[in-house]
Image (cartoon, rainbow, N blue to C red):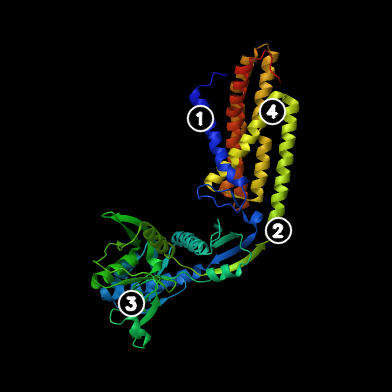
Amino acid sequence: MYKLSKERVLIILAICLVGIFFAVPNFLPQNIKLPSWWQPVSLGLDLQGGSNLLLQVDFDDVMKERMSTIEDSVRQTMREHRIRYQKLTAGADSVKVEIENAGSRNQAMGYFRKLDDGLTVTSDADGVVEIKYSDQAIAQLKAKVVEQSIEIVRRRIDELGTKEPVIQSQGSDRIVVQLPGIQNPEEVKQLLGKTAKMSFHLVDDRTNAADARRGKLSSSSRVVDGVDGGQYVINRKPVVGGENLTDASVSFQEGAPVVSFKFNTVGGRKFGEVTKENIGRQLAIVLDDEVISAPVIQSAILGGSGVITGNFTSEEANDLALLLRSGALPAPLEVLEERTVGAGLGADSIKAGIIASVIGLIMVVVFMVAAYGLFGIFTTVSVFTNLFLLLGAMSIIGTTLTLPGIAGIILTIGMAVDSNVLIFERMREEVKNGRSPKDAAEAGFTEAWATIVDSNLTTLVAALVLFWFGTGPVRGFAVTLAIGIATSMFTSVTVSRLIIAGWMKKTKPTKLPI
């Protein structure tokens, strides 16, 4: 068993050194500035202190905007096809219109179904046509609204300079925001209280900002500040709303970064008509009453997709694409709950976790040395290596450590020696059966391997279930436990085997010290 190839030994040592290297920042003073790729494990809200907010997405407001858009499209469709109608109204979740002629009504219903994906169109005996989204379409829309609201929240939170905020959905229409290190949630609430309203407006090329400030401004235009520090005079009525935007990403044309975007059916049709009729004019992209970009329309953009060109750097193009995606389906956010966790409580939790970990480590070491002598000391080395690998892995993937995560570390310390116990007990049995130390050691590692895999695999499945169905701290515990299982299997089997193989090769013992 001790004839390990040099390549295998080097791989084992390299993994250990990499793990130790990335674990080192966790033991350095916090005031030392380290590169972004070499950082300690981030502390969660319960350890660092901070603010916890529970937000609710106002989906009703989104549906009202959607119905208003559908109403405009219905009116335009019937005018284009010269279909007589009356009593066109938009409600909270549907649009109704009365069409007396049965033939025209059937023709109009066919047009209405093509206005947007997921629409259901029905009529009653009185000739009233009702247009609404199906339950499946509403569920998909609600999920998309929450997802894009999370992007908006994340972008705004980043403006505060917080480190590793936790932002995730809860239920179908709620968002949990955890801000480690932020003790005053009021500024956060004010920041999140603004509705991320995205819209596209034509720039009024007949009036400049200077004339507008002197009062020479048409009633159909308004002045809006730009992110570049300038001011723009834009048409009050948007040509397309952000609710029609479905995607935006960075692509390249002739080596230069551009922003590709895509609208739904309604938005694509509107956008195509506007760009076809206004080539050479500027189109302002407005987010939260601020112009984030005002590119010139170079050609008609048909088919519901196109590109925004400009002197973008890759970073600027990425930022613009993110802004477009974030504002695709804006919705008001209401603060349902707020909690503040003091930094002192977090310090006490860390202290208690460290004490528990040290006590657990000492007890494990004492037991292993008492039960297995020299091999127990070898196991102690592998346990410490396991802790370094665990911290290193958590630092590499950017895991946020919470109080349940510390519990996972403590559990990992106890479980780290399980495999060694199985291996050493198997060695004892082989020695009793008369096998030589070398053969007994070899049998201990090879014969116990199947049992080690089975026992750790069941625990890993439990950790994956906790991660899949759990939220917040429960997921933190599951992540720590899963990483601990992987590192403990590596150290208990591979590192311990390397140490024992090296010892046996050097000493050539006639009796195993267990």
Q: Please tell me how crowded label 2 is: few (under 14), some (14-19), or many (20+) other residues with Cα within 10 Å.
A: few
Q: Residue 11, labelled with which disc?
A: 1
Residue pictured at 56% horizontal, 66% vertical = 56
Disc 4 versus disc 2: distance between alpha carbons? 37 Å
- Contact between marks 4 and 3 (CB within 8 A): the answer is no
Identify the residue position indicated by label 3 in the image: 100
Q: Is residue 465 visible?
A: no
Q: Quadrant of residue 112?
A: bottom left
Residue at mark 2 = 344
Give the distance between the C-alpha atoms of the residues marked 3 and 1, in whole angstroms: 80 Å
339 relative to 42, above or below: below
Q: Counting residues from the N terminus, which is met first, the one under dot 1 or under dot 4? A: 1
Residue furthest to the top in view is: 434
Give the SS element for disc 3: loop
Q: Nearer the viewer, mark 2 or mark 3?
A: 2
In the displayed structure, 415 sits above or below 273; it is above
Distance, label 1 to label 4, CA atoms, is 23 Å
State the mark number for residue 377. Answer: 4
Secondary element at tag 4: helix
